[in-house]
Image: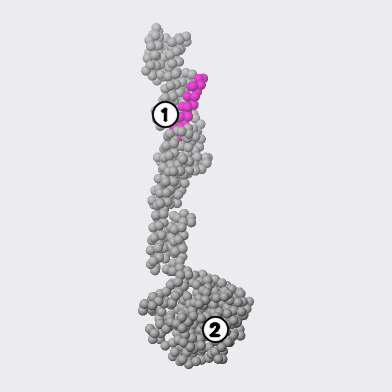
């Protein structure tokens, strides 16, 4: 008898695997599903048909022997000499052949056992997976209703889907498509792990995605693209919950590189600021730093502050007190750095006691700070100038000046009074404010001091004086709107002041006294908010401006309003003998440039 069995193997199509998740995001709705083609990538168990076996008449015993030998050697289904096809042929010839039936049962068990072993070895081994699929097809052909066979088929199909997803992920990983945009390796590995959470191949692939993202972050950091480094570290962080340690270490390395770059930019910018022309370069380095520094970075904030200080104050800081060395080894006047800013200069229309010369009120801005004498220039400081320069101030040349006459209570011209004299004509103390100097004497002192120090000293502009006098206070008086000065705030004409002969003031601050009838030694009273003494009182002071009857068309940048050849100059600031109206912050007066008297001194400003 000849039994001819045709061999055919067909495979059923598989539905597409589920879409994978993007790195750190939800399901990628539009990612194409996995598709496979070719024998080695089919994802379902095919249909197996036994190969043909020709049984000769009277040879069944020999065929039984051949089948047993094939079963013993593990050749189960591959061709017509394998165990299963022979047993099937024997049973077709004689359905009651019990030996063949028992042999087929043993062969079916062997098929299941081999299939399980092949599935166990199939991870990463395509040949073993194909063999498992073939064995599952054989088992289904032999015992389609057996629960073990049905489970084997499901396991084989799952293994194929798992392999397809892993292979797709590995292909994308090699191509550099990690999954940061939703299509790529991580999505496939995540789908694989959804099928088999402990699949070693998918776990390794996912770890490789994390490692690749970390590598890209560190590469970006090497080329100083820290924004990209942060993005890649974010992708790496999203790969797996248990990967925080590796990402944390990578982030520390990236941060170390970032901090090193920030520190290098800071150091270079500070070197730039030392140079006189380095401000622009320092700003450019700050811009570079802000491109890579995280928000609120303290180094960037400190550099910004230092550049702002350099922009507005050079090498100084607001409120800093300093002196410059003179050529003879002495020190110049103490100077304090006044902060840059803006203020409303002049008097408002409704201000009591205001005059038209103090209006209109207008805004003035100082884009750069400046240094101003802590006190009025003293007799000792001015005397050093006279001695070294050989100068002969105006009162000395003229032989007289205007002093306070105690007997009459008025101001009168007295012979012999000059810069060495006090308010009453008697010799002044070294620490008294220098009096009896004209504006040109003050300018000559500033020019000498500039020559001695190599720095530019000058009289303050009227705007600088009022700005420093107010020190941020827009009120009527330097201390505010109170009708009486605070105790210790300055040397003003007070109702409690008494002259050596017992005189009192007719127009003074009622109930106020400062202990001095004339000028006090400099610095005896409390400084204002910016550390300056005696701006509001003691003596009025020359400024650089020429007199103008109002502030119409006055400079808005704080510069002196000066017309070459003008004789009428401006004095500012309250005085020991002035009325309350003359102590207002906006008060100003016109004075001839040759005038010298016991009420006017000066202080200087220095550029920074």
Which quarter of the image is occupied by the C terminus?
Answer: bottom left
Query: Which quadrant of the figure has residue 70?
Result: top left
Q: Position of residue 4 (x, y in %)?
A: 43, 14
Residue found 40% across the figure and 65% down from its top = 273
Q: Residues within 10 Å of mark 2 (few under 14, many from 20)?
A: many
Residue found 46% across the figure and 65% down from its top = 308
Name the secondary structure under disc 1.
loop
Which one is in front in this view, the residue at disc 1 or the one at disc 2? 2
Which quarter of the image is occupied by the N terminus?
Answer: top left
Query: Which quadrant of the figure has residue 484?
Result: bottom right
Q: Position of residue 184 (x, y in %)?
A: 45, 40
Residue found 45% across the figure and 71% down from its top = 321
Q: Which residue is denoted by mark 2 in the rendering?
A: 517
Report whether 182 appears left or right of 355. Answer: left
Give the residue furthest to the top: 58
Disc 1 to disc 2, how far (Cα)? 109 Å
Q: Can residue 555 be seen by looking at this rendering? A: no
Secondary structure character of the magenta stretch overall: helix
Colouring chosen for the image of the structure? one colour
Q: Which residues are magenta?
A: 145-166
Name the secondary structure under disc 2.
loop
Magenta stretch holds residue 95:
no
Report whether 586 appears left or right of 304. Answer: right
Residue found 45% across the figure and 49% down from its top = 230
Q: Which residue is denoted by mark 1 in the rendering?
A: 122
């Amino acid at each position: 008898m000849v039994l001819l069995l045709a061999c055919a193997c067909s495979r059923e199509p598989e539905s597409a695997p589920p879409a994978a998740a993007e790195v750190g995001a939800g399901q990628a709705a539009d990612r194409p599903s996995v598709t496979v083609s070719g024998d080695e990538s089919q994802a379902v168990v095919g249909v197996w048909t036994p190969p043909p076996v020709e049984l000769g008449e009277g040879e069944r015993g020999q065929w039984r022997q051949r089948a047993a030998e094939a079963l013993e050697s593990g050749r189960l289904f591959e061709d017509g000499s394998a165990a299963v096809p022979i047993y099937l042929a024997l049973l077709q010839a004689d359905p009651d052949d019990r030996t063949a039936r028992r042999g087929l049962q043993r062969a079916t068990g062997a098929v299941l056992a081999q299939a399980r072993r092949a599935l166990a070895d199939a991870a990463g081994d395509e040949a073993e997976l194909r063999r498992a699929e073939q064995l599952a097809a054989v088992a289904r052909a032999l015992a389609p209703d057996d629960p073990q066979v049905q489970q084997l088929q499901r396991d084989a199909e799952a293994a194929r889907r798992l392999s397809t997803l892993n292979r797709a992920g590995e292909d994308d990983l090699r191509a550099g498509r990690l999954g940061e945009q939703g299509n790529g390796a991580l999505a496939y590995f995540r789908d694989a792990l959804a099928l088999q959470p402990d699949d070693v191949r998918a776990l390794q692939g996912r770890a490789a995605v994390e490692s690749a993202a970390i590598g890209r972050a560190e590469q970006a950091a090497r080329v100083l693209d820290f924004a990209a480094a942060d993005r890649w570290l974010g992708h790496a962080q999203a790969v797996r919950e248990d990967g925080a340690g590796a990402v944390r270490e990578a982030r520390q390395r990236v941060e170390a590189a970032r901090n090193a770059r920030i520190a290098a930019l800071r150091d270079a910018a500070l070197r730039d600021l030392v140079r006189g022309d380095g401000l622009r370069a320092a700003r450019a380095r700050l811009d570079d730093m802000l491109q890579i520094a995280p928000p609120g970075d303290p180094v960037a904030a400190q550099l910004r502050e230092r550049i702002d200080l350099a922009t507005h104050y050079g090498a100084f800081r607001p409120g800093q007190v300093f002196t410059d060395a003179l050529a003879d080894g002495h020190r110049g006047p103490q100077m304090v750095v006044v902060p840059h800013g803006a203020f409303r200069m002049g008097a408002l229309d409704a201000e009591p006691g205001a005059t038209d010369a103090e209006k209109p009120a207008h805004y003035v801005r100082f884009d750069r700070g400046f240094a101003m004498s802590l006190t009025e220039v003293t007799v000792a400081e001015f005397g050093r100038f006279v001695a070294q320069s050989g100068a002969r101030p105006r009162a000395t040349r003229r032989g007289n000046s205007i002093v306070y006459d105690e007997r009459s209570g008025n101001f009168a011209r007295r012979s012999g009074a000059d810069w060495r004299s006090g308010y009453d004509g008697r010799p002044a103390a070294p620490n008294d404010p220098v009096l009896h100097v004209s504006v040109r004497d003050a300018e000559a002192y500033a020019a000498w001091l500039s020559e001695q120090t190599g720095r530019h000293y000058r009289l303050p502009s009227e705007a600088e004086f009022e700005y420093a006098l107010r020190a941020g206070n827009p009120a009527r008086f330097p201390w505010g709107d109170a009708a009486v000065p605070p105790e210790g705030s300055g040397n003003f004409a007070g109702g409690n002041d008494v002259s050596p002969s017992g005189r009192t003031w007719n127009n003074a601050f009622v109930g106020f006294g400062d202990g001095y009838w004339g000028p006090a030694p400099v610095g005896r009273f409390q400084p204002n908010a910016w550390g300056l003494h005696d701006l509001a009182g003691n003596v009025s002071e020359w400024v650089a401006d020429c007199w103008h009857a109002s502030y119409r068309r006055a400079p808005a940048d704080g510069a002196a309003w000066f017309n070459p050849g003008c004789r009428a100059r401006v004095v500012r600031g309250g005085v020991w003998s002035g009325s309350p109206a003359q102590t207002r912050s906006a008060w100003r007066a016109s004075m001839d440039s040759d005038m010298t008297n016991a009420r006017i001194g000066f202080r200087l400003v220095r550029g920074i």
